[in-house]
Amino acid sequence: MSEEQMQILQMVANGKITAAEANQLLQAIARADAKAEAQESFEGDFEWPEMPEMPKIPPFPAMPNLPNLPKMPFPPPSPRRGTGRSGRENRLKSYGNAMKAAGFDFSDRELRSMQHHVTVEFAQALRDAGVTDLNGRELTEMAIHGVRPRFIREARELGLDLNVRELVEMHIHGISIRFIRKAKELGLDNLNARELVEMGIHNVDLNLMSTFKAIGMHVNAREMVDLSIHSVTPSLVQAINGLGLTNLTVREVVSMGIHGLDEDLLEAIAAQQLPGLTAKDVIDMGIHGVDEGLLESARERYGKELRPKDIIDMAIHGDWDDEPYRPSRHSRHDRGHDPAAEIDEIKRLKDEEID
């Protein structure tokens, strides 16, 4: 019996611990002794196997000696480009000689302005396209703005014989051969350079012209520019067409664009199915600030008897009923007018159907 076990038995005899507690302590000591014996047995009996010897790596074969590289020959000296005034003069002289060899005769001043923009090949290509008698300034402008001989030839095929200024302006404002061809296909057969330039300046959308053509209306170049200036779009034209107006003119469409009539409002007006509606009525509604809310109020008040004039009167004179007059932003009540008298006058005008 170990010393620890003797101590535990002595503590039981002295009454310091119970027999059950003593039994737990004795079991714990027994488990610890068993674990220690197992560890000593493992460490005493196990032997690690010996590692086999690694095979020796054979030596790498010796690298063969590289042959001696031949000596590189020195390149011949390049012709030294002239610097300073003498160099510039030499380059200008060489450029002038090349132009003369191609059949052009320009002054030194013209050559200086052309030298960094106009190549001999470009000048020859323009001449081959039929553009002759150009001075140095004109050639330089055409080169800077990207005028190409092909554009000149195709424009002539479409009936446009353009001068230098017209060619430059058309390129500045993005007029392409494709644009010209499409405009002619849509009916603008007699376009001149000035009209094309204006269409480019105001970003005319030829899809708008297609929309007019689809609803049976012809539009000329001047009208296309006006429509573009006032932001008339294909969707707006379609909304106007939905009103069912007769004898509609392009000028009336432009006026609708000027006075801020948009697609939503036009669709709301069309939904009212107003009898006798004219383009002037629609324009007046735009002028006097008619909106969807006013259209609904007018329909609630007049029911099936609602006419365009009623809507315009409500927009001009404000919203009134049998109750005391309620001045709106259009009312002149604050300028000394009698509200009751105004109501009587409005009713009289309605009865007489005076615009």
Image: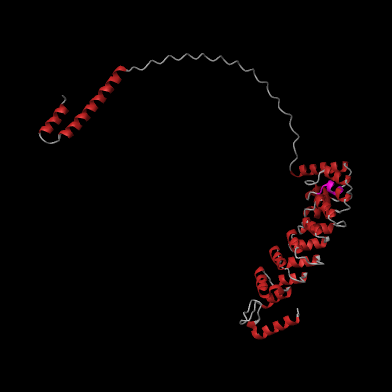
Is residue 336 visible to the viewer in this orientation of the structure? no
Q: Is residue 200 left or right of residue 45?
A: right
Looking at the image, residue 72 lies above or below residue 337: above
Picture quarter with the C terminus: bottom right
User: Is residue 151 magenta-colored?
Assistant: yes
Residue 189 % position (x, y): 87, 56
The one nearer the camera, 158 or 20, is: 20
Looking at the image, residue 252 lies above or below residue 328: above
Is residue 201 visible to the viewer in this orientation of the structure? yes
Q: Which residues are magenta?
A: 147-153
Residue at 30% from the left image edge and 20% from the top image edge: 42
The one nearer the camera, 135 or 13, is: 13
The one nearer the camera, 345 or 120, is: 345
Residue furthest to the front: 304
Residue at 29% from the left image edge and 18% from the top image edge: 44
Prevalent SS, magenta region: helix
Picture quarter with the N terminus: top left
Residue 56 % position (x, y): 48, 13
User: Is residue 122 magenta-colored?
Assistant: no
Looking at the image, residue 291 lies above or below residue 91: below
Looking at the image, residue 192 lies above or below residue 11: below
Residue 192 % position (x, y): 86, 57
Residue at 10% from the left image edge and 32% from the top image edge: 13
Residue 157 % position (x, y): 88, 49
